[in-house]
Image: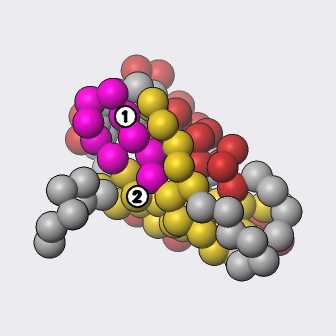
Amino acid sequence: MPAGWSEVARGFGLAFTRTSVGRDAWFAGMSSWLTPEQAAEYRDVPIEAIPTGELTEVDVADPGSAAHTRGTLTYDTGMVLGVGLSYRAAAGGWLIARVELADVAGTG
């Protein structure tokens, strides 16, 4: 698989909490890193519901020859997002296909 998964995770991680740019600019910037299906999940989310924080760490597994990989995005607020990335040749590369709040305690 072509490289770029880590850069996509970082780009999304930075854009996700950049809500100060306003709703439309936030959605446009953040959704450019997402699959169309994942972008649709955020289309109607109020910007006030998006947590803030500075991205401090990006940890994404090397997918090797697979078309999928997973990783975590850690913020200075303690928030950790789990992300799933998919390689989509038609889209020109890696995209975020899943975003969820990670269970940092390891329970549940």
Label 1 belongs to which residue?
75
Kind of residue at disc 2: Gly
Q: Quadrant of residue 69?
A: bottom right
Q: Quadrant of the N terminus?
A: bottom right
Span colored in magenta: 72-80
Residue 38 point in image, percent of width and height: 49, 64
Is residue 87 shown left or right of residue 79? right
| Label 1 residue SS | strand
| Label 2 residue SS | strand
Q: Residue furthest left?
A: 108
Q: Residue at x 61, y 39 (%)?
A: 11
* Residue 22 vertical placement versus 93 (above, below): above
* Residue 35 vertical placement versus 23 (above, below): below
Q: Residue at x 60, y 61 (%)?
A: 61
Label 2 belongs to which residue?
82
Q: Quadrant of the C terminus?
A: bottom left
Q: Earlier in the sequence, mark 1 or mark 2?
A: 1
Residue 48 point in image, percent of width and height: 25, 34
* Residue 89 vertical placement versus 50 (above, below): below
* Residue 5 vertical placement versus 79 (above, below): below
